[in-house]
Image (cartoon, rainbow, N blue to C red):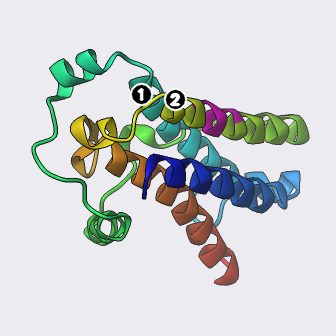
Amino acid sequence: MTRDDILRRLDEVQGESAAYWGAFDAPAFFAKLGEAWSPAENVRHLVKSIRPVTKALGMPRLVLWVMFGRAKRVSVSYDALVERYHGLLEGGAKAGRFAPSAREEHDLEARRTEILGQQAEANRALRAAIARWPERALDRYQLPHPLLGKLTVREMLYFTLYHQLHHIGVVERRRNAGV
C-alpha cells in the first residue's frame, strides 16, 4: 500500500469503526463481554494505541532515527504483518500497558459520546500526521511495537489499520457466541 492507499483505508476504517461502535446503546457499550473487555474498553484501548503512533509521526525524523535507528530491511506486506500478529496472539500475547485502565462510569451516554469522539479525533490526528510523511520515508524509519518489535513506519501504519478491524472482529465474535 502506498501512503495515499493507507490514508484512504484509514478513512474507510474510521467509517467502519464509527458505524460499528456507534451502533451500541450506552448500556451495551459499557457491558463486559464475559471476562473480556467491554466495547468501550476496546475503543479506549484503540485510542491508547493510536496516540503514540501519531506522536511519533509528529516528531522530527532525525529524532526517530536517533531513538530507533533506520530500517535495515524492506517493509513486509500488510498480510504478512497481520499473520505475524495473529501468531503472537495465539501464543498468548496481551495488551500490556496499552490495556484500558479500570473506570467506573456514571453518565453512560455522555461518556460513550466522549469515547467515540476521542477515537474519531485520534484517527483524524493520525491521518494528518501520515499526510506529512513522504512515501519513501515510510520505509526508512522504524518505530518500536510492544509485541512485534521494531517496525518500519509503513508496517506500524498497517498494524494500526488492522488493529482497529481486529477489535471489531473480536467483539463481534464474542457477541455472536453469547459471551
Q: Front-most of 119 and 161? A: 161
Q: Front-most of 64 and 107? A: 64
Classify 60 as above or below 111.
Answer: above
Magenta residues (range): 121-125
Q: Residue at x 69, y 33 (%)?
A: 121
Q: What residue would you read off at disc 2?
A: 129
Q: Is residue 83 left or right of residue 35?
A: left
The amino acid sitting under disc 1 is Leu
SS category of the residue bearing label 1: helix
- Quarter holding residue 107: top right
- The answer to whether the residues at label 1 and label 2 have Cβ atoms under 8 Å apart is yes
Classify 59 as above or below 43.
Answer: above
- Decide if residue 36 is in sight here: no
Q: Which mark is residue 57?
A: 1
The amino acid sitting under disc 2 is Ala
SS category of the residue bearing label 2: helix
- Quarter holding residue 19: bottom right
- Quarter holding residue 39: bottom right
Q: Residues within 10 Å of mark 1 (few under 14, many from 20)?
A: many
Q: What distance separates the C-alpha of mark 1 from that of mark 2?
A: 6 Å
State the image coordinates of residue 50 (x, y, percent, origin top left): 51, 38
- Decide if residue 90 is in sight here: yes
Q: Front-most of 111 and 121? A: 121
Classify 89 as above or below 102.
Answer: below
Q: Residue at x 55, y 35 (%)?
A: 126
In the picture, the quarter occupied by the C terminus is bottom right
- Check if residue 122 falls in the magenta segment: yes
State the image coordinates of residue 14 (x, y, percent, origin top left): 68, 51
